[in-house]
Image (cartoon, helix red, strand yellow):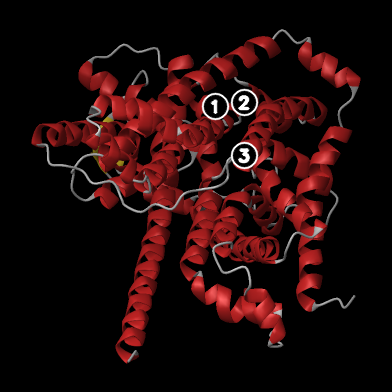
């Protein structure tokens, strides 16, 4: 059998993913000893920490998923204007690290918080309340996007039939909308539960004495260099993520057939309903974005809470302390992650979506999906154990590699879903004409899916800028990114500095999102112009 260049590239990619996804997890498991398991499980801290993690995760998951569903429903099932703008604003919290959400709550509702002093509030923020609220802020946008997409493409013909039969709106919601959202609800619950259960940023800032497992793992590894106990906790954190991954995999394998949407949902005019929708959306947006508004305010005050006069002293202090190096590190890591991550995930998707049902393609597809089941803190610890003796350890390169692995699955699925929509006979036609697979990739598939590539690049870049989990175990002074500067400044009680760093990360990500938006818009107009031009030449 002739080995083509495309097949060689596929095997190289398969080997790379095996070395960076499968191998580190196997090394993590190999480091666990019975003594370490006994030490962790018999510790007086373990079961209270597990309880804290489960209770706050369940609370945050229920609130986040319910809030996401109803806000997406309010946008798409009413006649509020500028739906795309509302959708974009509700996803802004995705553009800052989870630890920034926790810090924002402290700024607003802590003992000396802005709202605490302004409204004379007495809230016990530190503990379950703070962890739950911060986790909702952090995880809500992910569930919101899932529901928004599902509701946007829901078929209206079913509702038209129900109206003809005289079925009320309330009953339609119960017998049509909710059942049609069942798969999306399951996906959202699994995604949010995994995100919250494995996050240590929010609990680190707002947990107080209610320590969670990720915080314990972080302190064991970073503070005490106890890698064995950290590995045991890592496996515990890995368990629910694997269960969620298997459930989602089984769910996607059943009932995969889909009907063609023939008509988008039509919303009838109802001014009273729309006024309520505007009020609910505005209130929810204000509550979700209050931590970000706190960053803006406190980034330019002299000294919080003593002197709130405008000052650029925080910016000057950070510049003199070398924030430029951290900024360059973050941007460099994000650029490397986005460039190589997009290339690798797109080619993996091309190989699996357009390469037939070979065993190697199925293995590649499974490994490409596997990062969904690996929490960032677990992945980071497994990289420490696997690559600590390698020449690239302690460089920006290993931070880019771990980020590529951490965020690989979602961009892979974006490309996979786009590429499977092409005619399945294209490769046979190209082969009969003597056109190679790589030429098909460059000349046909890439030009047709440029918008997807832009979205993949944006996803890798933004997540590499905000992540604190996978990279936290691998950084040193020279390679530290901006996101990890936040807990360091917070431990020094430099609250204005943490606010400014969070704001800087947000501005960089907003700039990238704006560039991606205008690039996609230009591509859209160019495509429409090309279609119109071809149509005008048709006799």
- Residue 35 vertical placement versus 521 (above, below): above
- Outermost residue to the front: 165
Q: Which residue is mark 3?
A: 254
**Of the residues under marks 2 and 3, which one precedes in the sequence?**
2
Q: Which mark is residue 215?
A: 2
Q: Which residue is mark 1?
A: 204
Residue 534 percent location from the top left of the image: 36, 86
Q: CA distance from mark 3 to mark 1?
A: 39 Å
Q: Is residue 466 visible?
A: yes
Q: Residue at x 37, y 43 (%)?
A: 148
Q: Nearer the viewer, mark 3 or mark 1?
A: 3
Q: Residue 389, relative to residue 174: is it above or below?
A: below
Question: Which SS class for mark 3?
Answer: loop
If you read the primary sequence from the N terminus, does the residue marked by circle 3 or circle 1 appear first?
1
Tell me the residue at 75%/28% (across/down): 235
Q: Is residue 64 left or right of residue 273?
A: right
Measuring from the top left, give residue 455's x and y in whole percent: 48, 60
Q: What crowding class fits label 1: few (fewer than 14 Cα within 10 Å), some (14-19), or many (20 or more)?
A: many
Query: Relative to the observer, which residue lies in front, 316 or 454?
Result: 454
Looking at the rendered structure, the secondary structure element under dot 1 is helix
For the residues bearing labels 2 and 3, Cβ distance under 8 angstroms: no
Q: Callout 3: few (<14), some (14-19), or many (20+) C-alpha neighbours within 10 Å?
A: few
Q: Position of residue 20 (x, y in %)?
A: 77, 51
Can residue 303 be seen here?
A: no
Residue sitting at 81 percent across and 72 percent down? 8
Q: Quadrant of residue 284?
A: top left
* Left-right relation of 64 to 6: left
């Amino acid at each position: 059998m002739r080995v083509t260049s495309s097949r060689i590239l596929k095997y190289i990619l398969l080997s790379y993913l095996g070395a960076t996804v499968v191998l580190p997890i196997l090394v993590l498991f190999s480091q666990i000893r019975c003594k370490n398991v006994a030490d962790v499980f018999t510790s007086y801290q373990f079961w209270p920490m597990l309880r804290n993690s489960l209770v706050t995760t369940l609370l945050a998951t229920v609130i986040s998923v319910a809030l996401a569903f109803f806000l997406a429903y309010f946008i798409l099932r009413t006649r509020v204007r500028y739906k795309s703008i509302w959708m974009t604003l509700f996803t802004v919290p995705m553009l800052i690290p989870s630890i920034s959400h926790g810090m924002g709550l402290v700024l607003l509702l802590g003992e000396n918080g802005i709202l605490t002093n302004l409204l004379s509030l007495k809230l016990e923020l530190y503990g379950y309340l703070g962890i739950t609220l911060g986790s909702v802020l952090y995880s809500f946008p992910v569930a919101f996007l899932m529901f928004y997409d599902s509701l946007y493409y829901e078929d209206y013909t079913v509702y038209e039939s129900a109206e003809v039969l005289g079925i009320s709106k309330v009953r339609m919601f119960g017998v049509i909308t909710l059942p049609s959202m069942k798969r999306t609800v399951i996906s959202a619950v699994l995604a949010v539960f995994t995100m919250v259960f494995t996050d240590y940023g929010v609990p680190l800032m707002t947990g107080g004495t209610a320590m969670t497992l990720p915080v314990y793992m972080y302190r064991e590894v970073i503070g005490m260099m106890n890698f064995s106990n950290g590995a045991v906790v890592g496996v515990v954190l890995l368990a629910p993520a694997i269960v969620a991954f298997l459930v989602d995999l089984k769910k996607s394998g059943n009932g995969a057939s889909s009907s063609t949407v023939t008509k988008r949902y039509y919303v009838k005019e109802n001014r009273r309903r729309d006024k309520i929708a505007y009020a609910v959306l505005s209130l929810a947006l204000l509550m979700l974005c209050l931590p970000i508004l706190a960053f803006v305010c406190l980034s330019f005050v002299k000294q919080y809470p003593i002197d709130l006069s405008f000052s650029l002293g925080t910016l000057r202090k950070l510049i003199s302390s070398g924030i430029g190096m951290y900024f360059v590190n973050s941007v460099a890591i994000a650029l490397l992650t986005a460039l190589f991550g997009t290339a690798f995930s797109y080619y993996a998707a091309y190989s699996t979506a357009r390469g037939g049902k070979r065993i190697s393609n199925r293995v590649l597809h499974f490994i490409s999906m596997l990062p969904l089941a690996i929490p960032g803190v677990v992945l980071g610890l497994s990289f420490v154990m696997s690559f600590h003796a390698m020449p690239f350890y302690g460089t920006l390169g290993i931070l880019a590699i771990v980020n590529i692995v951490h965020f690989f699955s979602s961009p892979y699925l974006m490309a996979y879903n786009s590429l499977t929509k092409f005619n399945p006979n294209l490769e046979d036609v190209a082969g009969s004409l003597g056109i190679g697979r790589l030429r098909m990739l460059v000349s046909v598939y890439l030009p047709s899916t440029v918008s997807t590539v832009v979205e993949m690049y944006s996803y890798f870049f933004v997540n590499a800028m905000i992540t604190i989990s996978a990279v936290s175990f691998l950084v040193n002074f020279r390679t530290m990114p901006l996101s990890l500067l936040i807990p360091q400044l917070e431990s020094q009680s430099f609250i204005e500095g943490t606010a400014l760093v969070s704001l800087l990360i947000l501005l960089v990500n907003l700039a990238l999102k704006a560039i991606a938006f205008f690039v996609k818009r230009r591509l859209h107009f160019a495509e429409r112009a090309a279609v119109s031009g071809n149509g005008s030449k048709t006799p």
